[in-house]
Image (cartoon, rainbow, N blue to C red):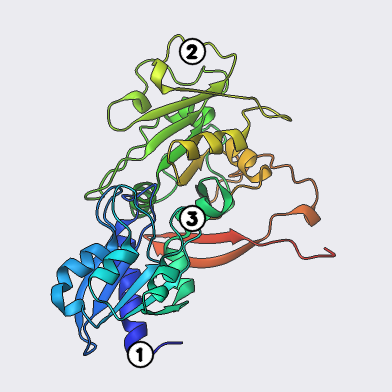
Amino acid sequence: MGTAADITAMRRAVTLAARGLGATSPNPVVGCVVLDAAGQQAGEGYHRRAGGPHAEVHALREAGEAARGGTAYVTLEPCNHTGRTGPCAQALLDAGVRRVVYAVADPNPQATGGAETLRAAGVQVEQGLLADEAEAGNTAWLTSVRLGRPYVRWKYAATLDGRIAAADATSRWITSPESRADVHRLRAEADAVVVGSGTARADDPQLGVRGVEGAVQPLRVVVDTAATAVRPGARVLDGTAPTLIAVAQDADTAHLPEDAVLRLPRAATGPGLDITALLAALHTRGVRSVLLEGGPVLAGSFVAAGVVDTVVGYLAPVLLGAGPAALADAGISTLSQALRLDVTETARFGPDLRITAVPVPPRKGN
């Protein structure tokens, strides 16, 4: 499964790829390292922004003639099509690279085939080195291509007994400044931040990224079915970032900017809008990753629709004993229907604990 030098180079490529998070959509994050014929690093690069040079091009430019006869390590199969940039498979051939090692096959039918092109030209091609690490770093884009909808990360902040606000509705601040700063990092990695009408009414959130250098501001989305929560002068309508107000097809939106209104069908059952239609509309607009920030009713709708890919909970060492819970009705009526999660990471932020988990398929017979 690769020599020590191979693993070191690919792990560096995975690290480089992460630098592009939040800036490359609708393209993937990709990292590349080029070693010369003697096995010494000659160049490295990552995909920095959509429409700009791909990772391989940056690495090959840095390597120059040293790339000839060398090895390129790429986190995603080199592309084989011409879009706003040329095919990376051809760039590797033109540079005289002898061997290409890539971690994950490209599932995009428009771009795949780079490995075949390289092999046909006599280049030694190997797949799968550190595939799990590369998949994890590019999970949002890979999910969007494979499922045809944006990847959804649901984030919430709660007390240790699961309350997101006190009985009198006060909620600022349950978690620490360190946790709130980390949330801004999550926003910076997302293409869109989504909240519901309850959050819009209670908090008048601005939903922009603060404190993250070089961050690309995400699209701000408020799910406001009746178009009554977002009023003129709301912070979400400022000029910080583009905004969409998702409303029912029959909602009166005369008080909203016309270009900010997204009309969607209502949910077939229960209140609110059709979540699948919302995600489809966002995907059409190039959104590949969504940070769902609340509140509990909207989160319940996403869980009920089966479209939550990752859960990130910030738990503060605080007890309230009353007040709204993090998740409202999600269509789960009995324990056997519970959405089971696999905890993938725990971390401390100030006094708080951040738990990251992903849904696991229900076991047969349960």
Seen as rendered, the residue at the extreme front is 121
N-terminal label among 3 and 2: 3
N-terminal label among 1 and 2: 1
The x, y position of residue 107, in whole percent, is 51, 59
Q: Which residue is mark 1?
A: 4
Q: Nearer the viewer, mark 3 or mark 1?
A: 3
Task: Give the SS element for disc 2.
Answer: loop
Label 2, residues with CA under 10 Å away: few <14, some 14-19, many ≥20: many
Camera-side residue: 317 or 308? 308
| Residue 39 visible in the snapshot | yes
Residue at 67% over, 29% down: 267
Q: Amino acid at mark 2?
A: Thr
Query: Quarter-wise, where is residue 18 in the image?
Result: bottom left
Camera-side residue: 178 or 303? 303
Q: Which residue is mark 3?
A: 108
Q: Is residue 362 above or below residue 1?
A: above
Residue at 74% over, 61% down: 362
Number of numbered markers? 3
Q: Is residue 215 left or right of residue 328?
A: left
N-terminal label among 3 and 1: 1
Camera-side residue: 202 or 155? 155
Task: Give the SS element for disc 1.
Answer: helix
Q: Amino acid at mark 1?
A: Ala
Residue at 59% over, 33% down: 277
The x, y position of residue 171, in whole percent, is 47, 38
Task: Give the SS element for disc 3.
Answer: loop
Q: Nearer the viewer, mark 3 or mark 2?
A: 3
Q: Which residue is mark 2?
A: 253
Mark number displayed over residue 199:
none
Q: Amino acid at mark 3?
A: Asn
